[in-house]
Amino acid sequence: MTGQKMKRIKAPDSLCDIAATAIREAIITGRYGLGEALSENSLSELLGISKTPIREALATLKHEGLVTIVPRKGTFVFTMGVEEVAQLGFYRFVLESTALDLAMAEHRKDLLISLKSICSAMTAAHGTGRMAEYLNLDGQFHNAFVERCGNLYLIGGYQAITGRTAALRTHLSKHATHTEKSIGEHIEMVDLLESGDLPAAVEVLKRHVTRGQRTYADGIQDIAAASAEDRVIRRKRTR
């Protein structure tokens, strides 16, 4: 084998990484609800590994903003108040609108092909009630123009909120009206981009990513604990 290169063997993921991936997925998909308490003992038993990698995994997820560790009380899935939801929506709009502008300038054809394909798959998934698939495709739609923007710092900033955004998307999908408006806006954005009306598409994007703050009545400190009466989309203020 002299002179021949050997293929490197991929090192297996650590138990911490395996645990973090499993818990992250459970939070994003809504298996663990916003604000729900997480037990190291239960997670250890469920995943079949010791509490040490579980503890390390939770520390990783705390850094990602997916869990909150409260001394002497425990670990909880993150939750948000209305104001924080509003701030996240604004941050998303700033990043995504800039990314969309850059991606359309440099990768218009490829981006439109990708967005149209994702929209088609989203429509099919939504129409047959495959909500988990629909929500995953929703994330892919927004990632499509972020990953094509060509700015590593913008991409990094967006990746830092993808977990929270995905979990919040799952939480908000429980509101039928929210999801109905959401799918229509994805289609509308693609149509506007294809027609060359980027400013109008950006306006739809703004309405789309900031809807979360309008889903709840003002003053809600914890959206996970909001009552059914609080979870009302104020239709007069959305479009």
Image: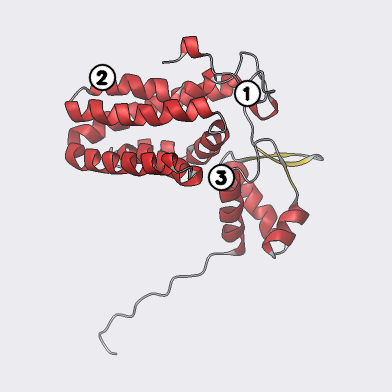
From this view, report whether residue 177 is shown above or below residue 8: above
Element type at mark 3? loop
User: How many angstroms separate mark 1 from mark 2 (CA)?
Assistant: 30 Å
Q: Which callout, 2 or 3, points at the residue further toward the start of the chain?
A: 3
The residue lying furthest to the right in this view is: 72
Provide the residue designation for mark 1. 81
Q: Nearer the viewer, residue 6 or 210?
A: 210
Q: Quadrant of residue 143?
A: top left
- Badge 2 crowding class, 10 Å Cα cut-off, few under 14, some 14 to 19, many 20 or more, is few
Dots 1 and 2: beta carbons under 8 Å? Answer: no
Amino acid type, mark 2: Pro
The residue lying furthest to the top in this view is: 236
Residue 53 horizontal/vertical position (percent) = 66, 59
Q: Which of 123 and 119 is in front in this view?
A: 123
Provide the residue designation for mark 3. 29
Q: Which callout, 3 or 1, points at the residue further toward the start of the chain?
A: 3
Dots 3 and 1: beta carbons under 8 Å? Answer: no
Q: Quadrant of residue 119?
A: top left
Provide the residue designation for mark 2. 199
> Nearer the viewer's eye, disc 2 or disc 3?
3
